[in-house]
Amino acid sequence: MGIRRKGWLFLPIFFFILASCGSGIEDAGLPSELYRQAREHSHRGEYQQALGCYARGLEGENLSEPSFEAVRALNEKRSLEGLTGSYAAAFATTDLLAGLPKGSLTDSLRTSMAVDRSRWLGELGQLKEAADALDTLKSLLPEVRLQQASYALRGGFIDRAEGIYGSLVSSQGDPIIQMHAWSGLLQCGARRPGVVENDLLDMARKIVALSGRVMSTKDRTVERVQALRHAASSLQLTQKHRRDASFLLFRALSIAGESGRPFLVEVLRLESNAAIVRKSDPFRESASYFEMKNMPYAEAMAKFMLSGSEGVDPEERTTALQGGFVAARDAAPPWPRPWMRQLERDALFQLNGQLLANSRIFELFDASQQSSMLRLSRALLRRADLFRPKGAEPDTMMAEVRTLLQNMGGLRQRKVDMLVNAGGEERRRAADRSLNMQYGRLLELLSSLRISHPVAAEVLSFNPVTLRTVQHALKDDEVVLAPVLSDSLAALLVIGRRNVQIASSRLPFDSEHPAASLDLNLRRELGASSSPEAMRGGEWEWFARSMEQPAREAVKNYRRVIVVSDALLPLHLFDGVGNPSSGRQVSFLHSYRELVILRANEALPPAASEICFYDADDQDGPAAHKMFFPRDRVFIIWKPYGEEALEEMKREIGTSMQETVSGAAALQALRRDNPRKWAAVSAYGVQ
């Protein structure tokens, strides 16, 4: 989960802080001298030493009547804490500054504090809070309002975003701001349910009409480029204006050459090539550039794009896709933009298709594992807040681990936001250094964490597993079914203790039944139906005709089935797989890594456990919960239930589990008595 390709240097930080902030001269303990030392350390990139000096200096200040130097030091400390991804400390220092007596802070400092707080909250995925943080300012510059609208849109608050963009369209004569606002309005419109392209064309025409004024604006090079980038990303949402989007990106690339910002130029080279031309050489060059800059997720995006370009032979395409997942695995942002998620999914489908066509079983396993580890890493970072004691007693180790995960997630997001924003690259080295230090600290904690939370410690070391390791973790009567999907082909990777095989689907995917929406369509149908038998004529019927027989044949010699899949598919409903008459127990996992860890830690000391439910479309919660609290019984629900219904099901499962420790076995017994009621509930974990 840390930065790869660079070694970690674990330093006794506290020793250096003390040594560097105590120079031996008479006034070394004075706040002014400590602040001077802090600034020298900061200038040299020695941020932890600088923070130590600021802390010691501020201990000698009277903040009820703060001096100018104290306010300045607090602000510099706040900025350094944010720069190094120490989010909790940065928020605490910001709050301390905000609470100083009236008149202590200038308006510009208050604005800077609100903008920085908003950006940090955005990096942590708290998008509503990021937008709210800017409401504390009395008046917002148009650029800040655009950022506020962006947070609202990313958070799904479309009405709020539309309101901000709409007010900017009507109140601003600046063509650059207007172009940003119309681009935002088009993106809001595209997110509305039931929207069709014709609904967006009027906004697209307004964007195109503004482009001439933006391109002819004097100076403001970077602002013009960013407006054109935003406009192009919006126009690409319409088929009719994709060539206009490509033109704007090429013009932006030309203008960016005047900016003297090589990172901005490189991002635009990638974006303009991806728009329509899709030549292979620029993608290769972009991948090499981002590798050199130690931006592995950006490198992965370039490699995924390379795989879809013309002139790339099948072997290079496979190598690019595999290399992309290796690069992305330990650097993926917790909160990727929609186009990043789509690129990840399309790359996996493309890689699966090539490997399935050539029956490359071992590489199929590796591709599935790389993708699932990426998602598991993402889940642990996004749900780090789950890792807290259940009782009243605080746990300092859990608190530190939780803070480290949150900080690492924010720093990962920051590095990827540099690609999204085509800027901020000057903060990359600080982010890399801080990521390495925080990951190093996490590794130091794991030996102690293994005593109290062995499963969490194992998963946070994040070592990959091999196919042989997975097979060794299985019992003789267990089999893994791992759905493998591509744009046209589908199969099940079937892993037993002594054999591995591919069970191919009977029907290919097509335009009426696309692979990309299979899981969503199945969950929608199951959620709306009274029972599996009622799902006739839709996606489920097609899916059963395609995969039921291969699945039934694959599991016929086994008593327990573990479905391992990024996106959960209800294979437990197949006749002969998990129906009550089959006598088989079926459970689900998102990754092979979870299987190996849970099986290796089956003999945990007895302790209290809970029964927990997660929706089937929650790709983070079940995995994070099971890794942090393996004793808890986690269940997947395939349709919505009210609180009363869930509480009743908890009681029934608890009663059924008095005779078995297995959640899957308890569900099997319940389904025998009432198959319709329990068809939409599945166990998560291993038995």
Image: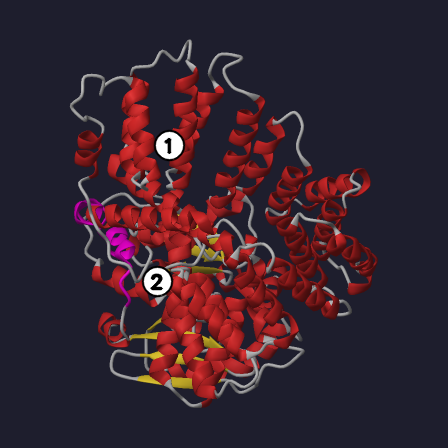
Q: Is residue 77 left or right of residue 229?
A: left
- The question of residue 524 being in magenta is answered with no
State the separation of the CA atoms marked 2 and 1: 47 Å
- The question of residue 446 being in magenta is answered with yes
- Residue under the point 65% across and 57% down: 229
The quadrant of the picture occupied by the C terminus is bottom left
> How many numbered marks does the figure carry?
2
Residue 346 percent location from the top left of the image: 53, 72
Q: Which residue is mark 1?
A: 89
Question: SS at mark 2?
Answer: helix
Residue 155 percent location from the top left of the image: 59, 46
The disc, 2 or 1, on the residue closer to the chain's N-terminal end is 1
Residue 44 percent location from the top left of the image: 31, 41
- Residue 489, compared with residue 196, is above or below; it is below
Q: Is residue 438 left or right of residue 219?
A: left
Residue 81 is drawn in which quadrant?
A: top left
Depth order, front residue of 572/380: 380
Residue 588 in view of the camera: no
- Residue 157, compared with residue 660, is above or below; it is above
Depth order, front residue of 417/588: 417
Q: Which residue is mark 2?
A: 665
